Image (spheres, rainbow, N blue to C red):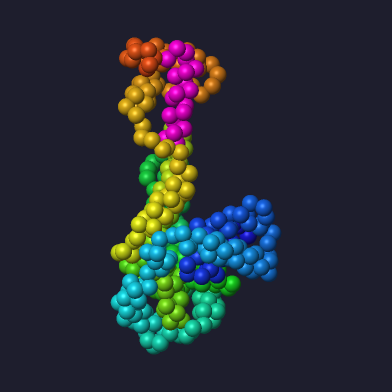
Amino acid sequence: MTEQNLYDYLNLRAEVYLKDTEYLKTSFRQFCKFNSIQNMDRDNMRKVAEEILDNAEKFYRLNESKKEKEYKGMFDEIRGDILIQKIYPSVTQTRKELFGSEDAPFLLDMESAANWIKQKAAEPIPEDIKRKKENFQKICDMYFEGLKNNEIHGSFGLSTELLDFPGQEGWVERVASSDNPLLNKLQQQVKSISNATGFPQYMITCFILTDMKPSLVRYRLKHSINSSCLPSGEWINRDIVNLEINASDLTFSEIKEIYDKYKTSLNTKRQKSITPKQKELLSLVTKLGDVPINGKGTKEYWERAKESWNELFPGEKERYDSWEGIRKAYVGLRNKIDL
């Protein structure tokens, strides 16, 4: 059990007006601050979820009256209903292709639908698919052998397609779908509809199999960190924030909430823009070459940096009196821009 597992479970159990809100996050953070969830079983998880959701409800009741009346909730019901009407022909077509009928095969019964998905995922791999995978493995072996001998460059791969669906206790579960023709077809249709509409994939799976309608979030903010290695061997981390907007009538309150979430997710340090003088400092140090972190050469390097800077900016306000001063300014600047 991880904190992310518990938070996902809370979002599935929460009322619409609490899902992924600051009320729920605050209640969740307070619980995690004083409690460990690593060895939590499902019975305790349900009790804990009720406690966290009750506190989130209290936060909501206390603070909602202070918010603007224009707040519209987490989901866009009007746009969601319109999109459901548009995708329904595709949904019924998918059912007919997979099950021979336009009716939902597991009407309002997600548990039976989940069991069917798991059963199909556990079936033996068809011979034709098995041969394709074996052939691809041979190509992979040849590629990595060439890479090892420095005979080829670049990269390639075969992604494993995953089918999302609501599982037991409200969890979102996944199975590999590429090895089963029925699941592969279902996953392709689910992915296509999800990309076109903004409905989460697990909700589209549920809609196709059970006729339980999906909900459309008004917006979704996702933060991820991309770690990449340079040819020199140095690793660089880069923050990526993706904003997905489904509603066409975002309110001022929601725009402010998006901005607050953006600042929180990035742990924003920089409040003011980089000044021209700070840009000059970055440029000067770049021209001097590799910056010694500690130890031998540190003092000599920053002495040269100080002299070069004072030649460029001899004024009393701009000049540095010691090598420690310019080094401190540079380190602070690098920390400010997270490099």
View extreme (front): residue = 66
Total marks shown come to 0
Q: Is residue 196 above or below residue 291?
A: below
- Residue 105 visible in the displayed image: yes
Can you tell which quarter of the image residue 118 is in?
Answer: bottom right
The percent coordinates of residue 328 (x first, y second) are 48, 23
Q: Is residue 310 above or below residue 81?
A: above
The percent coordinates of residue 298 (x first, y second) are 50, 17
Q: What residue appears at the point 50 percent right and 60 percent down from the top-left corner?
A: 63
Is residue 323 shown in magenta?
A: yes
From the viewer's perspective, tell me whether residue 215 is left or right of residue 296. left
- Residue 158 visible in the displayed image: no
Asked whether 173 or 4 is in front, the reply is 4
The percent coordinates of residue 163 (x first, y second) are 46, 69
Q: Which quarter of the image is occupied by the N terminus? A: bottom right
Q: Which residues are magenta?
A: 320-339
Asked whether 208 or 53 is in front, the reply is 53
Q: What residue appears at the point 34 percent right and 24 percent down from the top-left corner?
A: 277
Q: What residue appears at the point 32 percent right and 27 percent down from the top-left corner?
A: 276
Q: What residue appears at the point 39 percent right and 53 percent down from the top-left corner?
A: 256
Q: Which quarter of the image is occupied by the C terminus? A: top left
Asked whether 181 or 43 is in front, the reply is 43
Q: Is residue 253 above or below residue 124?
A: above
Is residue 120 shown in magenta?
A: no
